Amino acid sequence: MTESTGTLARIGRISGVVVLVVAAMIALGPLLWTVTTSLRTPAEAFSNPPQWIPLHPDFSNYAAVFDRIPIGRFFFNSVVVTGLIVIGQTITCTLSGYAFAMISFPGRSVIFGIFLATMMVPLQTIIIPVFVIIRYLGLSDSPLSLVVSALGSAFGTFLMRQYFMQMPRELGEAARIDGAGHFQTFLMIYAKMAGPAIATLAILNFSGFWAEFYRPLIFLQSQDNFTLPLGLVGLQGNLGTGSISVVLAGVVLAILPSVLLFIVAQRYFIAGITAGASR
């Protein structure tokens, strides 16, 4: 009985590893194809069967990206816009998540339910009212239009609320007995304990808004204000006649910041995601 149980356990572990390897290959396949195609000549890009590893890597595609579009300007715009959104959402979502988790006030559950319901509303259905408000504020064709319209997040509030609800309330009660207000309690105690969740929220926001295309397409008209995903469209050329290798070279350059951020901050991200499992 013990041997059979051990055999089943080994088979289960091996099966799990096989499934993970297959899933990783499926997930990394498009990324590998993107990187390798960016190193091919345009003629080799459409070879059949596909050549996964180019025999003669052509790095001139990356130089062509800098020649054809002002990628430095687009990169700067994306850094500014994404950075401001990440900071803004980190502040607003952390504060609102703390309020919904730790502060009792009339209608808290109803308000939170309505707030969560906004997650089911597609952005495409509200983009026109948002655009009208942006024009009313005088932010048309401005990178700030992307920042102001993204300062609040129902998902971010939900994430931080769930994290704060796992924290001991006794710490806050002790601080209030000592005369601390809600903001002092939040800043001096709970915000410091919420580091992994805040890091997770920041990473998710950075990855999402760094690659955002739809809102910049609607809100921005001047090329000088384009963010990186929108600016990369210029690599396609007239009627899509540009080199696919050059386009994918631009894509590789665009995804590098997100990859590097995850590599550097992955332990905080994993700690924030798995925090609930250890409590």
Image (spheres, helix red, strand yellow):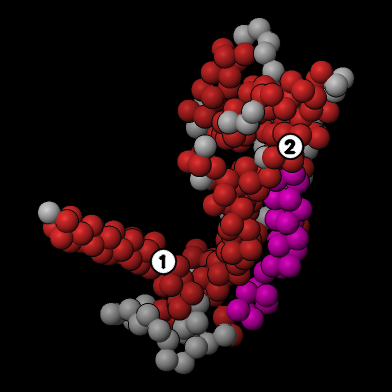
Give the labeled residue for mark 2: 191
Which label belongs to residue 28? Answer: 1
Q: Residue at x 74, y 41 (%)?
A: 192
Q: Is 233 left or right of 177, judged from the image as shown?
A: left
The main secondary structure of the magenta stretch is helix
**Extreme residue toward the front, this view:** 2
Front in this rendered view, residue 135 or 145: 145
Query: Residue 83: image x %, image y %?
Result: 73, 50
Query: Residue 41: image x %, image y %?
Result: 47, 84
Q: Which residues are drawn in magenta?
A: 62-87
Which comes before the other along the chain, label 2 or label 1? 1
Foreground tag (2 vs 1): 2
Q: Is residue 201 visible?
A: no
Give how far apart the Cα atoms at labels 2 and 1 are: 36 Å
For label 2, the SS is: helix
Q: Is residue 80 above or below residue 154?
A: below
Query: Residue 174: image x %, image y %?
Result: 77, 23
Front in this rendered view, residue 217 or 202: 202
**Extreme residue toward the top, this view:** 106
Q: Residue at x 51, y 22 (%)?
A: 117
Magenta stretch contains residue 63: yes
Q: Is 115 left or right of 142, judged from the image as shown?
A: left
**Extreme residue toward the right, this view:** 179
Front in this rendered view, residue 154 or 169: 169
Q: How many marks?
A: 2
Q: Residue at x 55, y 66 (%)?
A: 251
Q: Is 221 left or right of 27, judged from the image as shown?
A: right
Q: Are marks 2 and 1 in contact (CB under 8 Å)?
A: no
For label 1, the SS is: helix
Quarter of the rendering containing residue 259: bottom right
Q: Amino acid at mark 2?
A: Ala
